[in-house]
């Protein structure tokens, strides 16, 4: 595994970050928990190794929480996702926020494994939330990873303030 450095995205990173979002989300727009986000306008951290963008994490703050809106890595298992998640938690702690949270889908077993191994906990299941999101973004597939029907959102969180 190459050493990964995380920093705020710079204008020169735009093409690489957009390419990651195109591959993962079909473009710069995501719909989650009923909200539409343009990933190009939110704060973004990038993981860089040997001069190349290896991953990107898009986030925003609402209330006492840092929400991870998107986390993508060029190659799973390369260390970029973990470095980005840790950096986002540091941003949240530095801002004295109570929690870091994110949403994934019911089919995304690799993400559920990844997040839970890093201390995030499932705190809510939103049945049918992806079906509703599909109304706002029709190109969201109906079948996800491993042939699992894609219907539900799972909310995971990590307390940053020591609370439960």
Image (cartoon, rainbow, N blue to C red):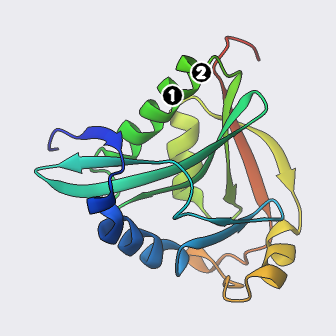
- Say above or below: 16 vs 112: below
Residue 104 appears anywhere in the view? yes
Up-down relation of residue 47 to residue 74 (above or below):
above
Q: Are marks 1 and 2 in contact (CB under 8 Å)?
A: yes
- x then y, percent, for residue 101: 68, 39
Answer left or right for 132 relative to 27.
right
The quarter of the picture where the N terminus appears is top left
Q: Place residue 33 in its image quadrant.
A: bottom right
Q: Which residue corresponds to mark 2? A: 95
Secondary structure of the residue carrying numbered label 2: loop
What element does badge 1 sit on? helix
Q: Residues within 10 Å of mark 2 (few under 14, many from 20)?
A: few
Residue 99 screen position, x and y as percent:
69, 27
Q: Residue at x 67, y 11 (%)?
A: 162
Where residue 65 sits in the image (x, y, percent)? 71, 32
Q: Which mark is residue 46?
A: none
């Amino acid at each position: 595994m190459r050493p990964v450095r995380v920093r705020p995205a710079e204008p020169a990173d735009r093409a690489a970050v957009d390419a990651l979002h195109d591959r993962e989300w079909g473009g710069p727009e995501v719909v989650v928990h009923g909200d539409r986000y343009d990933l190009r306008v939110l704060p973004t951290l990038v993981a860089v190794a040997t001069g190349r963008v290896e991953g990107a994490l898009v986030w925003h703050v609402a209330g006492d929480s840092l929400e991870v809106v998107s986390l993508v890595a060029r190659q799973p298992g390369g260390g970029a996702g973990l470095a980005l998640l840790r950096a986002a938690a540091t941003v949240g702690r530095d801002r004295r926020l109570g929690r870091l949270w994110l949403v994934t889908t019911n089919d995304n077993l690799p993400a559920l494994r990844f997040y839970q191994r890093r201390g995030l906990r499932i705190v809510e299941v939103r049945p049918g939330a992806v079906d509703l999101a599909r109304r706002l973004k029709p190109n969201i597939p109906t079948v996800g990873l491993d042939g699992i029907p894609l219907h539900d959102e799972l909310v995971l969180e990590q307390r940053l303030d020591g609370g439960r």
